Amino acid sequence: MTYEVGRPRGLLGGGIQQALDVVVNFSLDVQPGEFVSVIGPSGCGKTTVLFLLAGIRTPSAGRIEVCARPPRDAVRDGLCSVIFQQPVLLEWLSVEENVLLPLRLRDPRWWLWPGRRGQYLERAGQLLRTVELDAFSHYYPEKLSGGMQQRVAIARALTLDPQVLLLDEPFGALDEITRDRMNLELLRLYEQRALTIVFVTHSIEEAVFLSDRVVVMGRGASPRTGSSIVREVRVDLPRPRTAALKEDAAFFQKVREGRAALREAQQLQ
Amino acid sequence: MVQDTAPSVPPARAAPRRTPFADLGSWTAFAVFVIVAWEIGSRAYNQPYLLPAPSQIIAALREDAPLVLFYAGITTQETVLGFVAGSVLALLGAMLFVWLPRALENFLYRAVVTLNSTPFVALASLVVVWFGLGITSKVVIAGLYTFFAVLYHAHKEFISVDPMREYLMDVYNASWLQRMLLLKLPSALPIIFTSLKGGVMAAVNGAIVGELFGAFEGLGYMILDSRYVGNTVRVFLAAVFCTMIGWVLLGIVTVAERLLLPWHVSMVQERP
């Protein structure tokens, strides 16, 4: 799978940027129920990979399938859902309305059916309970902390009950305490709902703690060649994982392995 | 597991919100201040032909009340009709612009810019020629003033929505209409309201300019007529009524804004 950034148009853009292969030779097979993290130096195209998987961008060459269909269809059918770096909540909608937004978008004439709003609100309530924000359902998102906002985004991503969850550094903007707690929340959801997860991050500890497999991306020999997968680290630590794992020698060993792989990836440049 | 949802959650929407009429008191105080200062200044200056005092204007109003109120009614009617038509058309126009293919959008945008850079006074006199001396031509002129005030801002806001939000709409397969109503319009509303406040003032202006170019009723006609006969007090009286029309309409738009945008930051947070 390769992906090319479009050639910018305009008087001033032409000389500065040119068409660029961002990601090349990227071949990844994620098993159902697997938790895969994608890690790599900043600017290596991790987000691009995720956007390709989510069908937001289309590859210039290669083939991508999610749940045995093109990524766009998988997302549209509600089988696959995305969580971005920022919560991307609509500030004019209350928390619960943000959560039921996907239902509303899928059903344009929802307001014609008397009972439907009630059903949707009930669904939003359930989801907010799973992220423990049910007490805040009538708040505007702005009133919530960053971690709480990201939990609303998680609830929204679960609204259509997806099988695959794509996360793009979802907790990157949060402080460490909140991030640790969010990681445990995510693991709980992953285990309860038997999700398949692709998780983009730049933190090795986070990747090792969460995943079954860590995929390390690296940029090519020159800045003009695209990034590709350079290493893969299997994390066969037992599940369910708890905070105690972070004190475990096996965990440290895997983190060390991951860090070595990342260093190698950077030296390849 | 999660600590910040402890049972002691405050009731929803506990933050104090500004009520729609929060500014009424300070506006009244401002008006009283202006009138008193004007009265004192004008009496000190003592040139009633150049700067009549508020008391003289009130006396003139008492003399001509039915006629002035009738004229003010006409001008209000022109302003409101022009403002409503102009802003609705501007919003629909901005939506049309983003709906059209890029080439057509560019073409229409250029047409609008050209029309807007034509001097309004020239445009206004033409409109009077085309639509006659009645109320229609003034509604059209007020509408044009509002249209341009609102169109640019609405269009600009519609095309500069945060790309991540557009992606979100992509992901959930939103239709064009859903994207407009659930994303573009709400995120543009704060700026649209700011431009509507400019638009309401522009509409008053437009109506008066239209009346100056040919009319047989309305406050603009009264200004022209009183100036010919050298009755400065009545010119002031008409101007004061124009200001009041602007104030009241601005107040209505502001109240509508506060009711419609309770989520907007500038509404929920006091400026430091």
Image: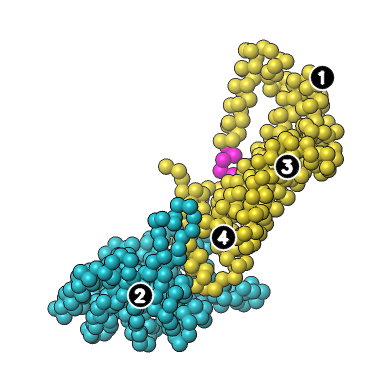
Find disc 4 in the rendering and name its residue: B184
| Few, some or many residues within 10 Å of mark 3 (<14, 14–19, 20+) | many
Q: Which comes sooner in the sequence, label 3 or label 4?
A: 3
| Few, some or many residues within 10 Å of mark 4 (<14, 14–19, 20+) | many
Q: Is residue B160 magenta?
A: no
Question: What is the three-letter code of the residue carrying label 4?
Answer: Lys
Q: Quadrant of residue A42?
A: bottom left
Find disc 2 in the rendering and name its residue: A24
Residue lying at the far front in this picture: please name it. A15
- State the image coordinates of residue B61 (x, y, percent, origin top left): 77, 26
Q: Is residue A213 above or below residue B197?
A: below
Q: Which comes sooner in the sequence, label 3 or label 1?
A: 3
Q: CA distance from mark 4 to mark 2?
A: 35 Å
**Quick check: B206 left or right of A19?**
right
Q: CA distance from mark 2 to mark 1?
A: 83 Å
Q: Is residue B21 magenta?
A: yes
Quadrant holding the N terminus of chain A: bottom left
Does residue A130 appear anywhere in the picture? no
Q: Quadrant of residue A62?
A: bottom left
Find disc 1 in the rendering and name its residue: B229
Q: CA distance from mark 3 to mark 4?
A: 27 Å
Between B102 and A164, the residue placed more toward the observer is B102
Q: Which numbered disc covers residue B142? A: 3
For the residues bearing labels 4 and 1, Cβ distance under 8 angstroms? no
Q: Quadrant of residue B62?
A: top right
Do discs 2 and 3 belong to a common subunit? no
Question: What is the three-letter code of the residue carrying label 2?
Answer: Val
Q: Give me the chain letter of mark 2.
A: A
Q: CA distance from mark 2 to mark 3?
A: 59 Å
Q: Which comes sooner in the sequence, label 4 or label 1?
A: 4
